[in-house]
Image (spheres, rainbow, N blue to C red):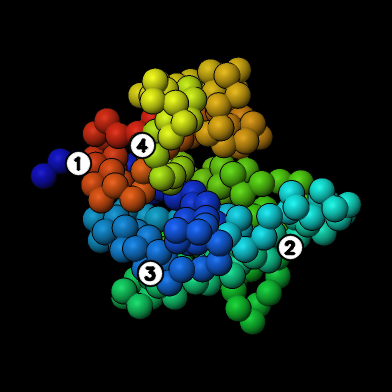
Amino acid sequence: MAELKYKRILLKLSGEALGGATGYGIDVQEAEAIANRIKEVRDMGVDVAVVIGAGNLWRGKQGLERGMDRSTADYMGMLATVMNAMALMDALERQGVFTRVMSAIDMRAIAEPYIRRRAVRHLEKGRVVIFGAGTGNPFFSTDTAAALRATEVDAQVVIKATKVDGVYDADPKKNPDAKKFDTLSYIEVLNRRLEVMDSTAITLCMENKIPILVLNLWDSTALTSALFGEKVGTLVTA
């Protein structure tokens, strides 16, 4: 059997991943489908940490356009990520996967406070750890939270889960001539302003030499193939 290339991963999910066809709300079937992908990976012996966004429940941009305070909008988004984390936790545990939700904002009745050493210990024990509430600070995205947590728990790769099979130079749904990149450097992503992750997240991964792999999570074989080092999606490295 082939040897695993990555034994500890940070999976970055958008909130819309839980939203089903509309992209809004929490679709239980979508949560179960994502949980099944994660279970496959966990059963392979891979340590899995997850950061999830909140776009299915709250879009701070809409509030900002109406004059909402930026910090208030960001804190609302952080709370929404915890709701998504709990939904994914429930879907995983119904499939027999031991899971912990850790929140960067203290809410002990529903989630553990984020403590780096405790998070690492959970991963060592085979639990899937879902990080909620972003970094706990306004003005930082969940992309940046993913890069930060990956660095803190010594993840070997950040896997950005999307509904396309990699990074293109244009929107492949609108432009049939869009070119897919197999590999990119961090600097190329920043210079080309490609929408892989935000610039803070890209820079953090670059400084800590953590590769970013963009793939289609809804391709039934993409994630497991990537873990064995097969060419899947787009790999961003030095």
Residue 225 in picture, x, y percent from top left: 24, 42
Assign a secondary structure to mark 1: loop
Neighbourhood count class around disc 4 (C-alpha, 10 Å): few under 14, some 14–19, many 20 upward: some
Tag 3 residue: 29
| Distance CA(mark 1)–CA(mark 4) | 23 Å
The amino acid type of the residue labelled 3 equals Gln
Quadrant of image for the N terminus: top left
Quick check: 156 above or below 50?
above
The amino acid type of the residue labelled 4 equals Asp
| Distance CA(mark 3)–CA(mark 4) | 22 Å
Q: Tell me, yes or no, whether the two marked residues, 2 and 4, touch with CB atoms within 8 Å.
A: no
Tag 4 residue: 165
Which residue appears at 49% of the width and 52% of the height?
13
The amino acid type of the residue labelled 2 equals Met
| Distance CA(mark 2)–CA(mark 1) | 42 Å
Tag 1 residue: 3
Q: Tell me, yes or no, whether the two marked residues, 3 and 4, touch with CB atoms within 8 Å.
A: no
Asked if residue 66 can be seen in this view, the reply is yes
Assign a secondary structure to mark 2: helix
Residue 76, numbered label: 2
Q: Earlier in the sequence, mark 1 or mark 4?
A: 1
Residue 39 figure quarter: bottom left
Q: Earlier in the sequence, mark 2 or mark 4?
A: 2
The amino acid type of the residue labelled 1 equals Glu
| Distance CA(mark 3)–CA(mark 2) | 25 Å
Asked if residue 52 can be seen in this view, the reply is no
In the figure, is residue 184 to the left or right of 67? left
Q: Earlier in the sequence, mark 3 or mark 4?
A: 3
Task: Using the image as rendered, state which of residue 208 and residue 160 is in the foreground.
Answer: 160
Residue 190 figure quarter: top right
User: Comparing marks 2 and 1, which lies closer to the viewer?
Assistant: 2
Quick check: 202 above or below 102?
above
